[in-house]
Amino acid sequence: RKKDSPVFNAGDALLLLDQGGGSLEVSYFLPGEKKRWNVHSFDDLGSVALRDRFFSLGSVKKKKLHNDIERKQERLIQYISKRLELWDGYPVLHGRKVHVYAMGSLASLMLRGNSYDIHNRQITKKFMLGKIKYNKRMLRKHYHSVSELYKVMQDEQMGRSNQMKSVSQRLLLTSGLPAYVGVLKRFQADAMQMCGYGLRYGVFIRLYEQDAQDLGMPPIHNHSG
């Protein structure tokens, strides 16, 4: 076993956060109890879904308040917090040590690396909050309204912008990362370990192997290469 691989004790839980553009899936697995697992999907907490909900022309009303970038960012975080508060949060995990893993395209953007480079890297809440704060500051430094941001994003999509870092990327980071931070707070965790590849498949392969044995089916063989 690699030295940075986790050590699971009896009763520990594995929590996987998988954020895509449209949704955020939060699943758990108990390594000591192979048949105990569950997946919950937040269909509106994906990075793109959150960005479009709060930073599109459709989100802007006539009142100046609704067009203010800082106010929109505050409302986004409030929205995520409310969504997580209404969720029971897997009562079976209460009192257990939870090992948190995360995957998703936003991780590669945050760490500026490919799946291989980011695999097994530990990301703390403090690190993500720093990323959010920095990108918020850069957006507010150059743009004064959601309408202005939206116009720049349109220019980027049409290939009319050559900025060093796109407005769309900064908005994805400030929109999507608060969901990761919110889930960590929900489970009283300080950090998550990035999983660039393999984890979600490994969990369900183990589940399948146990079911296969019960049914008298052939086991899954590992392949290398």
Image: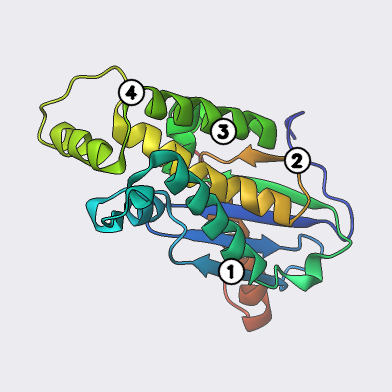
First of labels 4, 2 by sequence position: 4
Residue 139: image x %, image y %?
A: 38, 29
Secondary structure type for disc 1 = strand
Secondary structure type for disc 4 = helix
Mark 4 against mark 2, which lies toward the viewer? 4
The three-letter amino acid code for the residue at tag 2 is Asp
- What residue is at 78 percent from the left and 51 percent from the top? 188
Tell me if mark 2 has few (under 14), some (14-19) or many (20+) residues whose alpha carbon lies within 10 angstroms of its own: few
Mark 3 against mark 2, which lies toward the viewer? 2
Residue 114: image x %, image y %?
A: 43, 29
- What residue is at 53 percent from the left and 61 percent from the top? 25
Residue that extends furthest to the top in the rendered view of this protein: 164
The residue beneath circle 1 is 39
Report, in whole angstroms, how far the alpha carbon at label 4 lies from the one at label 2.
32 Å
Among the 4 quarters of the image, the one containing residue 29: bottom right
The three-letter amino acid code for the residue at tag 1 is Val
